[in-house]
Amino acid sequence: MQGPVQSSSTSVIRSSLIEPDGGVLIDLVVPESEREAKSVEAESLPKVWLTKIDVEWLHVISEGWASPLKGFMREDEYLQSLHFNSLRLKDGSFVNMSIPIVLAIDDETKERIGSSSDVGLVRPDGELIAILRSIQIYKHNKEERIARTWGTTAPGLPYAEEVITPAGNWLIGGDLEVLKPIKYNDGLDHYRLSPKQLRQEFDRRKTDAVFAFQLRNPVHNGHALLMNDTRKRLLEMGFKNPILLLHPLGGFTKADDVPLDVRMEQHSKVLEDGVLDPETTIVAIFPSPMHYAGPTEVQWHAKARINAGANFYIVGRDPAGMGHPTEKRDLYDPDHGKKVLSMAPGLEKLNILPFRVAAYDTVAKKMAFFDPSRAKEFLFISGTKMRTYARTGENPPEGFMCPGGWKVLVKYYESLQAEELTHQSAAVSS
Amino acid sequence: MQGPVQSSSTSVIRSSLIEPDGGVLIDLVVPESEREAKSVEAESLPKVWLTKIDVEWLHVISEGWASPLKGFMREDEYLQSLHFNSLRLKDGSFVNMSIPIVLAIDDETKERIGSSSDVGLVRPDGELIAILRSIQIYKHNKEERIARTWGTTAPGLPYAEEVITPAGNWLIGGDLEVLKPIKYNDGLDHYRLSPKQLRQEFDRRKTDAVFAFQLRNPVHNGHALLMNDTRKRLLEMGFKNPILLLHPLGGFTKADDVPLDVRMEQHSKVLEDGVLDPETTIVAIFPSPMHYAGPTEVQWHAKARINAGANFYIVGRDPAGMGHPTEKRDLYDPDHGKKVLSMAPGLEKLNILPFRVAAYDTVAKKMAFFDPSRAKEFLFISGTKMRTYARTGENPPEGFMCPGGWKVLVKYYESLQAEELTHQSAAVSS
């Protein structure tokens, strides 16, 4: 039954696969010495105008969070991401890649690019920031992309509605050369540490275990309990100097999430108030946009942190999930995130630390690990409930969040209400 | 940065993975000596009633087409299939598994099963045919299953509408023990060779290359040209005795497809008329139901044939595809099937042979490989067009299909029309 070995000259199909990064992070920012010449070249190329979110993804790719990806996905990478949540590399190994990282263009832009093999990328303010080389243009089937990424096509998915649906009918992939590091000039750039900078910081602190905590919400004492408990467990396992990477997501979030600047202020207070120990915590911004794609997205959240040097990842109930946009239920089974993460190709070496559920202990008057034997004495305070407290000016139970952090939230929701009142009176008077 | 090696006693999550089959096909039919005792035991267990299509899947699993899968999927296999189109095995290797092979039950059945760890499976005619052991019951999120399998949730997907939507809200997984080989008693059972029987037949014929051709339509001379050409190419590559596995799908198909018995008769004529060489062809039925899930399903079609001993797989334009149910376009990009197949985890060793497009050459008056330099002289005859010819009694161009095979189709469509007329006159007279 065994036939002759096939030579590679036969017409058997094998797609082009990308090279592994060999543990060395991709850094796609061109050296300063070449910047001038590349800028001149970029000016001569057909231009593609980026949206704010395209720039966030370009930032993500340029710093190596998605390494070994060297640019926006070509069709082979896109298809592997959609169907397999992973890419096969030239050496036969797999890396996890669960979210398509793609750049959409419209018909008119495609027309304008014509047969050019390279294009210049322009950010919304008109600055030319990158070259995309050896481009490939292919169809953007939005319905299929949404269905395979979110497991639903129901209307009301924030990223789908705000980013994918209005985008062009084509995707353009290629290799990125970024002319200079991406900055936002919003007073938070010092928090935007690249994977390389994070690895250097971990080395400087001589840590032997980095545990990453992804979040897009304010930190309450339940989160803190869990992070502090994780550190304790790592010490018990024999690690000498575990470091927490408190890593709030900095890109696109949905309209009713707390904005990044408010969250960063809140996180600062949590450290100031001593709820988390500044000596063993690094706070940095993860520049990725948010998909709210549950089990698919949690893989991306973990994979990017591995690239930045984390070796433990904390995962909780319904990570990256949200309510179903049209039905009264969670969009994802709350346990699927950690199950999918634990089986994901390319994440075999990641140490996944499951959450223990924390809730407000009404007897001890503090956040504590839930004890099912006295379930009635615990109060679960969801993100929605927390926002309602802050919005109505009602105080949450004592010990739910440090007072400094809570004040930041109250101030934010007061400012929102003031804004709403202004809008309403403007609407009445007009 | 490297920490101590983690012991397996820590609370890091790792899901249970299934064992590889080590190249030995799973055969889940119990030995005859145990049949009596197992039947008695099965009678004592809570019962699950199967649909016709559940029995088709049970047949598929029991013979090892889906090996190393040993029964209907538990949640870990189901999630890996949905998200990764593959399963990771205990030895770290991947096998392809692109389609969820699951058994749905309703609330009432779940209730009835209670805490029993095993159940008896009953076919629609009331015969108890199998035991499902160490069961796990988990939620059947139909929307998510459909979106991730088909890349759309548009109404009108045949398998989704006829099989998934009416099914229960729970899935039940476990290990199968089948009490005796599955038979259909439709006069076609002799065509239903198991993977084991096929491997034995290939060995008997001393073949050194098996090339599989999946089909669910009648064979026309364009297919034949391609299969004969493939054999020629394999001989040129140095193989001594290539065998064609002509492998029509025998399970669920959509209502306007030609039924299995008609197709089998048509295939016989094609061999009788000498269009395909009976000496180097094996015709057998592939017992799987059809999903029409394009790039996702073509992986299943290839994987199952590898299990049956094939080492070359012929793939054409838009394999397992169909028109979009609500839009005027193909549901899948016609090239995605072969691209996805060529990159699929667990299919690295499969030799994929791309179709050369055959069309009717109006000058040579025969099916020939399409020559773009004289495009106008070629006529593309789609499956829909072929069915229209047969339905209207019009003859297709000479040389499109062998006369014996064509007659079978004409006869079938005449019988359909006679049936329709009977229904219409019955409707008029009632």
Image: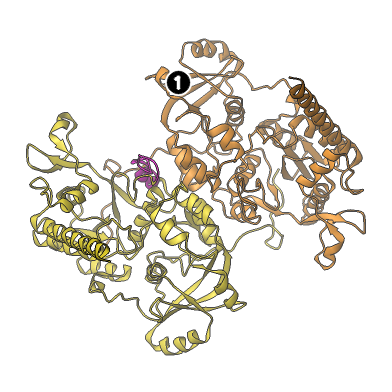
Chain colours: A orange, B yellow
Q: Is residue A313 above or below residue B91?
A: above
Q: Position of residue A79 (x, y in %)?
A: 45, 41
Q: Residue at x 87, y 61 (%)?
A: A377
Q: Position of residue A118 (x, y in %)?
A: 44, 20
Q: Is residue A90 visible?
A: no
Could you tell whether A210 is left or right of A333 in the image?
right
**Secondary structure under badge 1?**
helix
Could you tell whether A23 is left or right of A314 in the image?
left
Q: Residue at x 31, y 70 (%)?
A: B194
Is B330 covered by the magenta stretch? yes
Q: Which corner quadrant of the image does residue B55 belong to? A: bottom left
Is A224 covered by the magenta stretch? no
Name the one closer to the observer, B72 or B52.
B52
Q: Which corner quadrant of the image does residue B137 belong to? A: bottom right
Residue farthest along the front direction in this orientation: B429
Q: Is residue A373 above or below residue A265?
A: below
Q: Position of residue B330 (x, y in %)?
A: 35, 42
Q: Is residue B173 visible?
A: yes
> Label 1: few (<14), some or many (≥20) within 10 Å?
some
Could you tell whether B417 is left or right of A37 in the image?
left
Task: Say which quadrant the C terminus of chain A sits in.
Answer: top right
Name the one closer to the observer, B165 or B331.
B165
Read off the chain for label 1: A
Residue where numbered disc 1 is placed: A109
Type of amino acid under label 1: Thr
Q: Is residue A298 above or below residue A416?
A: below
Q: Residue at x 37, y 46 (%)?
A: B342
Magenta-tinted stretch: B326-342
Could you tell whether B390 is left or right of A396 in the image?
left
